[in-house]
Amino acid sequence: MMGHTHALSGAAGWMAAVPLVQDTELAGISIQLGPGEIVAGALVCAGSALLPDLDHRSATITQTYGIVTRTLSRVINWAFGGHRNGTHSLFFAALAGVGAGALALVNELAVQIFVFLMIGIALRGLGLGVPKNQTASEVINALVTAGIVLALYSAGVDYAWMGLAVAFGCLLHFLGDILTHMGCPLFWPINTYRVGNNIGFSTNGTVEQYLVTPLLTIAVILYSIYLFPWPDLLP
Ligand SMILES: [Zn+2]
């Protein structure tokens, strides 16, 4: 599955989950999602849906922050046993979710930096930037991301749901890879069997281009209409 399709699945997935997790309590954390939390969650989940491919040096996510993400990619690739290995396991999703959740509980500044990184990755994944101009794309991305993070900050967005959004984004990535020809070793490191290997539609093929990507885009638009209290938001 292409980077933009993964990112879209994260945004649509979070929006679809909102009515299910709204006003619930998960692991002692009460989940209350207003418009700010829904937007922030959709972007964080979209960024997280690209996280497992940080183990590949030419993946969208690896190219987002130049040397920073490229170095991180090398470390992750080494630690998780190469491409589409440990980072495509339930263990990784849990680790990323718990790590992000702990961050949200511990330090406000760390949360803002993490949100900045995830939203920047999401926007890059969704295709924001200038084609074939890496530097311009990075500058535009950083400016737009900073604007969004500041707006969310001044709106007082609560990030108690962060771990949930990150783990869910990773799971949606696995689902995307399983639905295409790529399989995922979900039970790594206990078992390296690749769930869904060699079955499904091909990456960037007809099904993905003309069915999956448009449907996900429509889902994001419809959920945006459904989830936000538009009459109250408009002047
Ligand atoms: Zn993948």
Image (tube, rainbow, N blue to C red):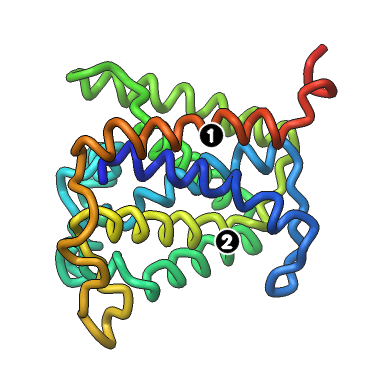
The quadrant holding residue 211 is top left
| Chain-order first, disc 2 or disc 1 | 2
Quadrant of the rendered image containing residue 21: bottom right
Q: Report whether 83 appears left or right of 122.
A: left
Which residue corresponds to the image point at 22% horizontal and 49% vertical from the top-left? 201
Q: Which residue is more in the foreground, 174 or 222?
A: 222
Residue assigned mark 1: 220
Residue 45 appearing in the image: yes
- Spatial CA distance of label 2 from label 1 is 19 Å
Which residue is rendered at x = 43% and y = 45% of the image?
9
Which residue is at 43% across, 35% downward? 215
Q: Quadrant of ligand 1?
A: bottom left
Reply above or below: 78 against 70: below
Of 215 and 115, which appears nearest the observer? 215
Residue type at mark 2 is: Leu
- Rate crowding at label 2 as few (under 14), some (14 to 19) or many (20 or more) other CA atoms within 10 Å: many
**What SS does tag 2 mark?**
helix
User: What residue is pinned by disc 2?
Assistant: 164
Left or right of 133, for residue 48: right
User: Eyeballing the image, is 199 above or below 204?
Assistant: below
Residue type at mark 1 is Val
In this view, the residue in front, 80 or 65, is 80
